[in-house]
Image (cartoon, helix red, strand yellow):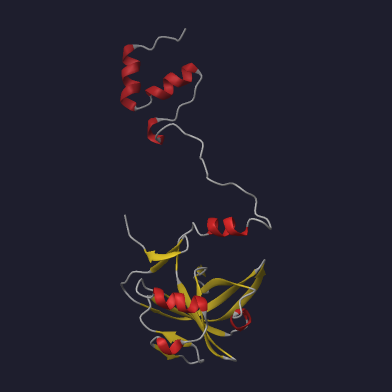
Amino acid sequence: MLPALTEQRGKALQCSGAFATARASLDGIWTPPAEHGTRRRMSVYDETFAPGPDTGVPLRHAFGRFGTGVTVITTASRIGPLGFTANSFSSVSLEPALVLWSLANTSRRHDAFAEAQHYSIHILTDAQADLALHFANRGDGFDAYPHDIGQHGVPLLHDCLARFDCTHFAAHAAGDHSIIVGRVTQVAAKADGVGLAFDQGQYGRFQAF
């Protein structure tokens, strides 16, 4: 038999939102307090796996669930100016100002960027998807896009949301990729504009709630 709750105590619990919790504690069954929302349920995924030699495709798809912005990184190399589209960009440190990005060891542009002492990272706008697609597929072809040549021969693309001019800080081997860390020496940024987004293999734009 449950101990009787007095009418006064019952009303106080109902008013406080804790009635379900108090009743459940008497029943021996836990129920989240009202302020914690609805009863918990087990999370269900469509696929669960341990990464391995045969899970490259689903692993890539799972990584792709994390939406990002899009950058084009440019540098001067022995074979001329090069561009590379990357969504692996991230800020690292404010003091000193450091950023990082990564590229596959199998990329034909890997060595040029891993060894580059100077390069620029451009944050693209939602109107620059064609530029992103171009440098995702090839490293040359700057003549099709407005740009200047910087102090160290680095192409500087026009009309981007922001640009970070960098010097080489470090390069780290990381599995089948290299992590490139750059020290930011100069920043150029616009006060407004909408960034190009990349999510689940598609380009788009961010929309606030």
Taking depth in this image into account, of 115 and 182 the one nearest to the observer is: 115
**Whole-percent x and y of residue 82?**
53, 85
**Whole-percent x and y of residue 10?**
34, 17
Q: Is residue 16 in view? A: yes
**Whole-percent x and y of residue 153?**
50, 92
Q: Residue at x 48, y 92 (%)?
A: 151
Taking depth in this image into account, of 123 and 200 the one nearest to the observer is: 200
User: Is 115 positioned to the left or the right of 160 in the image?
Assistant: right
Taking depth in this image into account, of 98 and 151 the one nearest to the observer is: 151
Q: Is residue 122 in view? A: no
Up the image or down, 76 lies above or below 65; here it is below
Q: How many marks?
A: 0
Quarter of the image where one finds residue 9: top left
* Quadrant of the snapshot with the C terminus: bottom left
Q: Residue at x 58, y 91 (%)?
A: 79
Up the image or down, 180 lies above or below 80; here it is above
Q: Residue at x 38, y 34 (%)?
A: 35
Up the image or down, 92 lies above or below 53; here it is below
Q: Residue furthest top?
A: 1
Quarter of the image where one finds residue 109: bottom right
User: Is 9 positioned to the left or the right of 84 in the image?
Assistant: left
**Whole-percent x and y of residue 198?**
44, 65
